[in-house]
Image: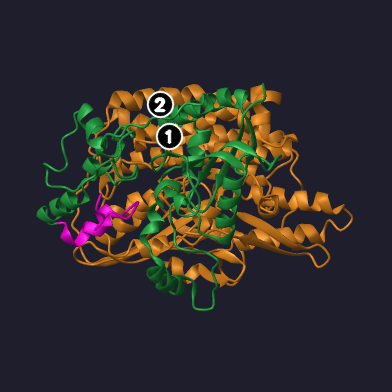
Amino acid sequence: MNKPKIGIFDLTDCEGCELQMLNLKDRLLRLAEIVDIPIWRLAKTPTEFGPFDVSFVEGTPMSADDIRVAKKVRENSKTVVALGACAHLGGVPAELDEAKRNIFMKEVYGKNYKTTSKPAKPLSAYIQVDHFIHGCPIDLDEAERVIVSLLMDKNPSLPSTPVCLECKERENPCLFLKGEPCQGPITEGGCKAICPSNGLRCWGCQGPVKNANFKAMEKNLERLKYKDQTENIMDAFSKQVGEKK
Amino acid sequence: MKDILDKYICRIEGHGYLKLSYEHAKVQLVIDEGERLFEKLLIGRPYSDVPFITARICGVCPTAHTLASINALENAFGVEINKDIERLRKVLLTGQIIQSHALHFFFLAAPDYIGLDNALELADKKPEVFKVALALKEIGDDIVRTIGGRQVHPVTPQVGGFTKKFDKKDLQDLKKRIEGNMHFALEALDLAGKFKYPNFGLKTQNFAITNWENYAFLNGKITSNTGLKTDIQNYELNIKEKVLEYSSAKHATHNKESFMVGALSRVNLQENKLNLKAKKAVHNFKNIKFPSHNPFHINLAQAIEIVHFMEEAVQCLDTLINGRALILKSPYKVKASSAAGAIEAPRGTLYHYYEIDNKGIIKDCDIITPTVQNLEDIEKNAEYILKNTKDLPEDERYHLLEMLVRAYDPCITCSVH
């Protein structure tokens, strides 16, 4: 039997999710025995440029090359998986829209500098994406589960429960009840509630949970006197303020 | 797809490629990565968001960004952190440097010296080396996971200390695991001492943070081998950034000249302060003496630092374990202020600067990453190599340049923040 061909691609981002793939260590080595990875820029010189059975794409398409690569990956892959929060949601850089970017670009690079880049958007703004591995960075167990499911031709099932469930399982004191902001109730779980478990608020990096009630969250932040920080808190990884759903 | 992707240099962090004139020995390292504008997206956010967000600048050295931003904010508020916090942060930063060096040394650079294409081949063909590689990457990850809460993008460090309490038993276990892996670090250093490094190199300016008492990495003064010694608050006067049309990363210079930061600069400036095992190993090298101006020795310096920082982590943990109950919060008051902070990230000195209003909201920010400081030096050394290899075939010359870029361990994702 031919081994399935896997492509791993990175667009503009921090490369932390790719690094998490390497951090699978012996689990990755076991996977590497049953698949071929002809292209992974961070790890090797490419040996083939497609077609691929499954391609993992990390990062947001920002530069002209990013956008071209994303489209080529789609043309050359049976299945495309968005790897991590930047590919899934746009990530932290996505809070800057075109108007803000234009102003800030001049402030940082001066008025003579010409960029080829566009505002950060999710991968799905450019190509059809079949599956997602959530998080900033991706969780190793979730990544392994999705990869193995795909290799077994199964639909990778993701939790569809909010971060709060995993947070309660760990018996963490609720940040909301302490009067602090937390995105847990409207955010998809699967991260083992790592941030609230370590005293941070949930930042929403796993993306909105099914039926997330954004309006209620906005009201809550107002009630907790975080009105002037609502956008900063809710839109850190993807646009949520003013969204319906 | 080949036409787009083939030009990018493999086994480096981020997207860069070489534009060359072999005939005129001219080199441009084209950096092509979207500008994420982190300095600007922090404006308007509370200072407490900064350590979390700046980690996202780089997945390879997120802990370095988190700690540099905390350092700057604490300087601004005048926070005096206690020794427990300082030691625990040191342990965390050793973990960051070890995990990054192990990744770069074995997975990105070493295949060049062993004559392989990638680290997965290493698993097949040199399993004994691969075992060392995995063990060292894991111990670095382990340190960052234990103290920082996660190996990529830490969750525990914050202004004034840590978000969580630490059990001394966990620190004791961590110390044992580091000691148990020390022999791997020495094996790696032995291996690095035997690599055949191409022999090129121009005398350049070495920069690092140093202090009088030890091999500095968490605090000190900006120091160079050309006699500069100044407070980090003066960083802007000494490190000037310029914008180039072919690069979305800026280039930094000192007195209009290129300079080098990172493992080799640190070893060059403070070899005498290395911890015992590292120092002893360096003295046993027959053909290599420091200071060295061969940029390929950056990889050797990384192997030296893995040993040094593992010793450092053990010493800090020892003091923490044997001392009184840990206090991991230092009190502070938010005030309108501004200050720079700097630490030694794996690739060199990392500067963060913040201006904060009286409510703790960020008004301005400036970040200068190590790779921005190295880019000019990479190009200069690349041109030097081209000038001195006119007899070699083009593909060999190109391979040497790729090796050179990799040796510097550029973090392009960081450089375009």
Based on the picture, tell me whether residue A86 belongs to the magenta stretch. Answer: no
**What is the number of the mark on residue B152?**
none
Q: Position of residue A192 (x, y in %)?
A: 31, 32
Q: Against B140, is B247 above or below?
A: below
Given residues B246 and A6, the one toward you in this image is: A6
Residue B298 in sight? yes
Q: The residue under label 1 is which amino acid type?
A: Ala
A126 with respect to B363 (left or right)? right
Task: Tell me the element at label 2.
Answer: helix
Q: Which chain is orange?
A: B
Which quadrant of the structure image shows residue B27?
bottom right
Q: Against A65, is A170 above or below?
A: above
Which quadrant of the structure image shows residue B83?
top left
A45 with respect to B72 (left or right)? right
- Residue underneath mark 1: B313
Q: Position of residue B331 (x, y in %)?
A: 19, 49
Residues drawn in magenta? A226-245
Q: Residue at x 62, y 63 (%)?
A: B376
Badge 1 sits on which subunit?
A: B
Based on the picture, tell me whether residue A227 belongs to the magenta stretch. Answer: yes
Q: Position of residue B227 (x, y in %)?
A: 55, 63
**What is the number of the mark on residue B175?**
2
Task: Tell me the element at label 1.
Answer: helix
Toward the bottom, the furthest residue is A111
Q: Look at the numbered discs 2 and 1 and tell me whether their residues touch, using CB distance below 8 Å.
A: yes
Q: The residue under label 2 is which amino acid type?
A: Lys
